[in-house]
Amino acid sequence: MGESTSSISDRFSQYTLRWHGSKLTTTQYALFAIQMAVIILLSWLGAIATPVVGPGIGFLFWAYPFFVVFTLWWGFWGIFGAWLGSFVGSGLLTGLPVIPAMAFSIGDLVPALLIFLLYRGYLRKHGVDPLGRDILKSKKSAAWFAIWVMGITNIIGGLWGVWVLVLLGFVPASAYALGAGLWILGDAIVLLIAPFLSKYVTPVVERFGLINTGWVS
Amino acid sequence: MESKNQRAEKRMVKTILFSARSSSFYVNMNPIAKFALLIMLSVGVVISMLHAVPDLQYNLLVLVLAVGFLIESGTIKYLVKSYLSLLLVALMVMMVWWIIFNQVGSNPILSVSFLGATLHITYLSLYVGIGKVSGYASMALMTLLTIMSTRDADIISALNKLKLPFKLVFFASLIARSLNIMADDLNSIKQAQFARGAGSNSDNIFKRVSAFMMLSIPLTTSIIKRSVDMGFALESRGFSKTKKFSNFIDEKRMRYSDFTIIAFGIFMLLLPFMAQ
């Protein structure tokens, strides 16, 4: 017989939503800076080396699966990295001005935050791995990933991003639905990478003791 | 033979993206003044673009200014090599979207019927399209100019001047310096995969995603390895006990020219309001 839900939840009980603000090691300090540099780099590549399908809309945003997994591992730092990657990498470094880039980046910050809250809060207590290692194994986990990560949070990010572009006069208001649709579809495609990353690399990161058990450390 | 002055003229410094002429006025501008100018001009252009008919003259003025400083700082060649095709495609897509989805004006120059819908191209819709495209281009070039003419040391110096905590400033400097290192790592992994027959340059989206998937795992493990190495290196130099930078000498003071640039930025910011 398989493990009961309560024993699975016990195994995940160390990964919580506690703050843990004062326990950062020097290795973690370096790690969080480097992961942010990688998200900035991938966000930049996602914006300049992918097909442009609309004003300010690239089709494959490579940084998305990375910041999803980094958020599950590193909480606050992953969420902050998602924001910084979008603001600097796919914003400033691609020529998007400061104000649009700032507004734009909220479209990555909010999904990352919602993903962390759900996985470390509700799903952890209901037998779903808070680090996403079981997405390829368990139907329940795969369904939550499809609904919450590829669906709801991705849709929120897409609707927000294109709304900002309309608000700033980059995209005509009548093209809002088309722009948002292309954005959401492109991100959903690249998000297919996240479960693999989570399954194969999480054990390595865990072995080094580098996974946050709370928001900060 | 080149004179000493000519050689000095050609000397370049490494910036966040690419490198720039070390003797350039824009490169040597105080980073606080530079970023203030960027923000003020961006706000000005956004205000111009928010009008039903954008202020074309204003957008073109900012565009000319950006191109002028790109030439002066010696960064225009990098922009042409790395960004021009991307920028042209983005601007073309923007123009097409504005012509298709913004049916304004009377007296069409051209009417096209497609699948029962009729598309009218008028003088007004073209003018609005050009206004939007010029605004976007001017903002893009100003931002790229700032990024391509600023060194990571300038950012650290500016953050230091703002009296931010040492750990925060050092964290920002680590991010800036890791960008190039991780870009090199990513490139090495790509080349290693190509040498083994993996990787893909195909136009098929799913093939590109699967090629990227193969890249993502070694990239993530390289992040972990670099962090562990860097953590040990920092700790062996007593990082956790350090309270401030020991000898940070690369500081830029605010000069009269920086104040003039900020005053010019304020004028440019007010211009769209005065024109209303």
Image (tube, coloured by chain):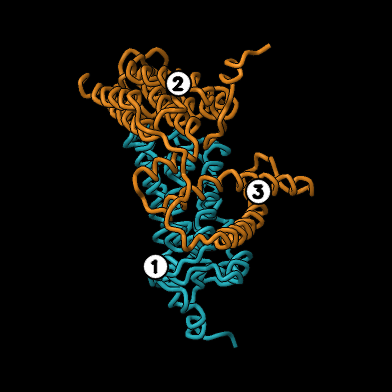
Chain colours: A cyan, B orange
Which residue occupies the foreground of this view, B1 or A189? Answer: B1
- Work out whether residue B49 or residue B157 is closer to the camera in this orientation and state it: B157
Q: Is residue B220 above or below residue B12?
A: below
Label number found at residue B69: 2
- The disc label shown at residue B185, or none: 3
Q: Position of residue B74 (x, y in %)?
A: 54, 22
Q: Secondary structure at mark 3?
A: helix
Give the answer, above or below, for where A151 lies relative to B55: below
Q: Is residue B116 visible?
A: no
Residue A117: x and y in percent read 39, 66
Residue at the image point whose x is 48% and y is 22% from the top: B24
Q: What's the chain of the residue with tag 2? A: B
Q: Secondary structure at mark 2?
A: helix
Left or right: residue B63 compared with residue A196? left
Q: What is the spatial separation of the Cα atoms under label 2 and label 3, in whole angstroms? A: 32 Å
User: Compared with residue A46, is residue A135 higher up or lower down, i.e. above or below?
Assistant: below
In the image, what residue type sits under mark 1? Gly
From the image, which quarter does the N terminus of chain B lie in? top right
Which of the pair A131/B120 is nearer the observer? A131
Q: Are marks 3 and 1 in contact (CB under 8 Å)?
A: no
Query: In the image, residue B102 lies at what x, y percent?
Result: 35, 27
Q: Say what amino acid the circle numbered 3 marks.
A: Asp
Residue carrying label 1: A21
- Label 2 sits on what residue type? Phe
State the separation of the CA atoms marked 3 and 1: 31 Å
The residue sitting at the bottom extreme is A1
Task: Categorize mark 3 by other alpha carbons within 10 Å: few (<14), some (14-19), many (20+).
Answer: some
Q: Badge 1: few (under 14), some or many (20 or more) residues near its Cα, within 10 Å?
A: few
